[in-house]
Amino acid sequence: MVRRFRRLPLRSRLALLVAVAVAVAVAAVAVVSWVLTRAQLNAELDRSLENTRAPQKLVVEALKKCAVTAEPVPVDEDQESFAYTQIVAPDGSRCVTDYSQPVKVTKLDIGVADGRLDSALHSGVTDSGREVRTHTTAMKLATGDIAVSVSRPLDEIDASLNRLALLLTGLAGLGVLGAGAAGLWVARTGLQPVDRLTDAVEHVARTEDLTVRIPADGDDEIARLSRSFNAMTEALASSRDRQARLIADAGHELRTPLTSLRTNIDLLARSERTGRAIPPEDRRALIASVQAQMKELAALIGDLQELSRPDVPNGDGGPARVVALHEIAATALDRARLRGPELTFTADLAPWYVRAEPAALERALVNVMDNAVKFSPPGAEVAIVLRDGRLTVRDHGPGIPADELPYVFERFWRSPSARALPGSGLGLSIVARTVAAAGGDIRLEPAPGGGTSAVLRLPGAASPPPSETPGAG
């Protein structure tokens, strides 16, 4: 049953659930109304019986009649009174008044007749089987005390209750049908945005068209879902565009070293085939060029692998942890000195501890310092200063024009003046990504007196947390 219900469409399930809920509510209200009405009618009947007193004259005449015949006189139902009156003796015998139906005597009636009870209110039945409600009280006569029972049939109450039951049943049925129709209408109306979202998802899955947008009006859950879907497709479209651009740029960047490699290797291979030896100086130059191109290819592939890693720090450097930024900067500075032995390096590194991936952070600092080495003329000074989480790497190179500063962190972007220098154009993009993953930011700005300053800001503290031991990678 549950499986069959789950196979129904969502709008059918909603309509069915609404109809069932309304049916239960209407049934509960109908039953409670019927029970309360019956209780009220019975209470009114009991009060009416308690306030009804048989005339003493009628009782005396009935006693005289009963003295003549002990059997009750048959009464035509058309001549019945609205209440049945009879006299009950302590021995259980009875005397029925005119226009009354005889009611079977109970122990309660006898108890009133023999003086054990003052009165009795109970349900009873006539000799013909009609249900009645009876009120028996004691009456004093000159000849002695007797018990007088006044009864009223329950037919009138049962008829009213039956009519009420039929009415409530009809109203409940109409209510359930109306609720089912209303539920179906509400489900169709309320699920229209979901239908649009479903159509959009199916369209995207079928055509891979990520430009689809769904109107999102209001602040309800459906509108939030639509906005989330629009944001998701927009992010996917942007990611796909970046991926396509990365592949195109990577192919363009790989083409140059591969072309040079192929040319140089073709020259070496042709020399071997033809037997014409290449002069030693030219051969050494060709081998050096091949080695340089191989090194450039390896660096480019390494940068591409770095960019392909997920944004969450979980690569070969391990998860993020508290590290000493000043120690990592000192290690990167040692590597920079090897790359620029003709330069002068000055360092002022105050202790600063950050939470980052050590290996990735070291690569980022090495890239920043390599840029300073690359663009600094021989004999120039490169200054590295770390104060309160602000790391500044200043060179005395040609600087970066102001109109090119917004593009320096884009992938494969290279300044026209730097295209003749080795590099893939991915270094600063990797730096920006690593710094952002550590919760910081980086910017390049013209330095006073010429050159460029790379400024990194990383959140942290001057001392490590007591519960963690910092590491430098």
Image (cartoon, rainbow, N blue to C red):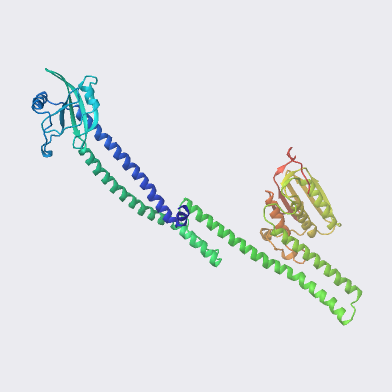
Judging depth in this view, the residue of 246 and 368 nearest the camera is: 246
Residue 26 screen position, x and y as percent: 34, 45
Q: Residue at x 53, y 58 (%)?
A: 230
Task: Tell me if 429 is positioned left or right of 143 in this view.
Answer: right
Residue 43 screen position, x and y as percent: 25, 32
Residue 281 screen position, x and y as percent: 90, 73
Judging depth in this view, the residue of 98 and 355 nearest the camera is: 98
Judging depth in this view, the residue of 368 and 2 nearest the camera is: 2
Judging depth in this view, the residue of 288 and 175 nearest the camera is: 175
- For residue 264, what is the image quadrant? bottom right
- For residue 270, what is the image quadrant? bottom right
In this rendering, the answer to whether 419 lies above or below 383 is below
Please, which residue is most extreme toward the right here?
280
- For residue 380, what is the image quadrant? bottom right
> Does residue 252 appear anywhere in the picture?
yes
Residue 53 screen position, x and y as percent: 15, 26
Q: Residue at x 42, y 53 (%)?
A: 14
In this rendering, the answer to whether 136 lies above or below 380 is above
